Image (cartoon, coloured by chain):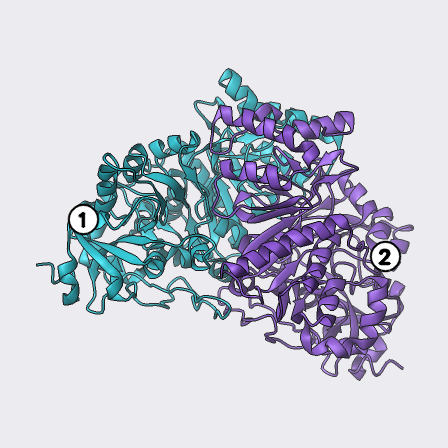
Chain colours: A cyan, B purple
Amino acid sequence: MYEDRVRNSALLDRIVSAEEAALLIKDGMMVGMSGFTRAGEAKAVPMALAARAKTEPLQITLVTGASLGNDLDKTLAEAHVLSRRMPFQADPALRKAINAGEVMFVDQHLSETVEMLRTRQLGPVDVAVIEAVAITEQGGIVPTTSVGNSASFAILAEKVIVEINLSQSTQLEGLHDIYIPTHRPVRMPIPVVSPESRVGVPFIPIDPNKIAAIVITEKLDSSSTILPPDDGTRGIAGHLSDFLQHEVKKGRLTNSLQPLQAGIGTIANAVLHGLIDTPFHDLKMYSEVLQDSTFDLFDSGKLDFASGSSITLSAEKYKEVFPNLNKYKSRLMLRPQEISNHPEVVRRLGIIGINTALEFDIYGNVNSTHVGGTKMMNGIGGSGDFARNGYLSIFVTKATAKDGKISSVVPMVSHVDHNEHDVDILATEFGLADLRGLAPRERAPLIIQNCCDPIYRDQLMDYYKRAVVRGGHTPHVMEEALSWHVRLAETGTML
Amino acid sequence: MYEDRVRNSALLDRIVSAEEAALLIKDGMMVGMSGFTRAGEAKAVPMALAARAKTEPLQITLVTGASLGNDLDKTLAEAHVLSRRMPFQADPALRKAINAGEVMFVDQHLSETVEMLRTRQLGPVDVAVIEAVAITEQGGIVPTTSVGNSASFAILAEKVIVEINLSQSTQLEGLHDIYIPTHRPVRMPIPVVSPESRVGVPFIPIDPNKIAAIVITEKLDSSSTILPPDDGTRGIAGHLSDFLQHEVKKGRLTNSLQPLQAGIGTIANAVLHGLIDTPFHDLKMYSEVLQDSTFDLFDSGKLDFASGSSITLSAEKYKEVFPNLNKYKSRLMLRPQEISNHPEVVRRLGIIGINTALEFDIYGNVNSTHVGGTKMMNGIGGSGDFARNGYLSIFVTKATAKDGKISSVVPMVSHVDHNEHDVDILATEFGLADLRGLAPRERAPLIIQNCCDPIYRDQLMDYYKRAVVRGGHTPHVMEEALSWHVRLAETGTML
């Protein structure tokens, strides 16, 4: 049994139950688990940990690629297994624990976590738990629907637990490109020169002796939670598509644009989807998460190639894509998130990065993470890797939230994840502001006029005018700069 | 005459007066000028422009490497020649004009300006004005004490004016390494794999027909304005040196550390100077500006090699170094700032970046640019290129300013240039906070205890405690978060 999935016969006798495997993880350990935006996470061992925590003290530092599916972060948080969590999460129960100060959350640029582990600035990783399609004859681990940080976890950890997931299609084999930068001081250039560059091997190469346990599972990935395009997201997509066509007319881009990155979520997915009805062609993606829109773009003939670190699909798209993966396979590649988000590659390829803002201010600073300046939503994810280093940094959001009670365009953001130096383009359903080459005093009227919901426009312009009277490169009425957030907390609306 | 400096004989008849050369620059043009932190700026043509502006309308967009010496930014600002200025400045008169909204200042990451010019997202550059030691037989321009953005300006501009500065030592020839990344979509890796990698040519290669005028000058560079180390800066240097030695003990670094970058200014210079009295050896620098401390480290035998984009020295050091440049030449290299600060190279080499903060907050966000949140000081410079992408991101400042009236450690910074995701280490004369792997609630007590001046410590801890009661991943009392800045503006002190 399982010889087709565990092809190194010496490893067959390491197949154990999830509970038994989980015993390798002790209280106080740092554990690296596979999983990136609800794709390819280890599923059985974390559940066994949560169960065990009911009867004995068990708290760990959990490091992943990004967010986990199957309510694992919820289950682990509610079982109080997590003392520390990094570098990203997107779970309401875990979020609650983080905001209550019960879980120490370290919110990191997604390209940086394994760089810090490799240099022992974090760590050591005691145990890695990696979901796999198969283990090769040489003991190489073939990941499933995400690579994330799995390769480095397995390489750095003392012991590795592999979860062989029988539900994950064997067609995934060959899709991955595992390349790990060498430990400094001697590091050579990363040889990725286009989204389709294959520079590594299609499995995680480790000493099979490190594989301490193998668990057989069959639970599916969770499907994505994105909503279908609506008028608002279609509006944003329209403004962006007009802008990109304008760039083509100006001769700054061709109709093949530059490689595209799009953040996780409904808006970025809708923006990509919107490219179907444009004159663009022969597009390429060099992104983190490949969502439904990637496959819609493939099917429409617009997209030539997509490189990512995970595939996260809606339930319907999942059923469409995975049984037919071979149809897409020559145009797809999954990489470690260190490579999908690497500053070196992002700058070299000249990526157009499209990410979602929670709010932005009249000078172009973006808050991606903190509701009301204090409460963590999900985390910065990879947006900073792309916004700082790419060709064009675009942030999108709907102009208001909570039925207009919250304006996404404010005098001063309550937390800064992307500052004015890193933001080229802002777009809402009302319009787009092109900030390139503009000073703060030029940006403000443009952002207010083009991006702000009309119901907040006068109020925002009034703030700006009074700020300008006080002077400064970036004028503010400092005692009022955060008053919109204070008013929201006190009265329930920014109006 | 000048045949030793203008070696392409066809160009000799293009030697004209500065006034005549300046006529190539018309009202409304974008002009790229050499100059990086008071080193190697074009000196005669800008003065001629300022003079001409007295009698005719003349306003330009001025792009440089970084700040200019010889009071040029002051002279140009006071003559109202500057309508727009990028990407950095450090002049009190220009600063005043920027803060009054008279000059539109675009404050950019220093690695990004020419990338935006090359892709025509800014520009076009109409005229480049480049200070040079010589023009080669083939028409190549040999820069002087800085490279900055000069190479790309000359390559991209329609017309080039060269200022041959007879006071600049001919020993500078051979020191420069000019490498320009290719225009996308096809770009190969930048082959710099160590600070001493020579990957280009020692001159700016352009078609000599583009050289429209040559001006002969002899004014010296301005000397740097850094102050000698004092108790405060020695204290900061001591804490950093202790920290780095601790990292060596932990096995995370060797005694040769990683390549060092240090920002411009008194504190960073003192910190580097402080490395003389440590067990470190065989150090290398991969930085922007090479200051006095670089040569002190060479002379002490601690430093093996230094790569930068400019050399900016005190008057005394200048007299010591430049007549004896050949002594240092095999261990020195000057590169375009796009390469000295390139995300690709910064990440590959694993640079330790040491930069100066104006203020930082209890969660590790850093303000490098805006006094009181509104008034521009100098600009972000290259700090963001290094802080985001390097191995270790260190920010230093004295704990107070203005005789204790201003605390450099505040509840919330009034402007964010480097956010919590990009800041590893904070140090003042009181101590150092190592933020790696910590959540915001862990950072705050550490920063307050280790870095804050004792006269502000209780006040800051009181804020933090009251913030924690409100909850959140990053607790704040939002209506008080900027109250220290408001109090300073109203009462003259944050106390």
Residue B155 x, y percent position in the rendering: 67, 68
Label of residue B58 in the image: none
Task: Mark 1 vs mark 2: tell me if same chain.
Answer: no
User: Which residue corresponds to mark 2?
Assistant: B49
Which of label 1 and label 2 is nearer to you? Answer: 1
Vertical side of B97 occupied by A161: above or below: below
Question: Could you tell whether A310 is left or right of B118 in the image?
Answer: left
CB atoms of marks 1 and 2 within 8 Å: no
Outermost residue on the left side: it is A1
Q: In this orientation, does residue B351 appear? A: yes
Q: Secondary structure at mark 2?
A: helix
Amino acid of disc 1: Glu
Residue B305 x, y percent position in the rendering: 65, 72
Q: In this orientation, does residue A241 appear? A: no
Residue A84 x, y percent position in the rendering: 40, 41
Quadrant of the image occupied by residue A259: bottom left
User: Which residue corresponds to mark 1?
Assistant: A20
Amino acid of disc 2: Leu
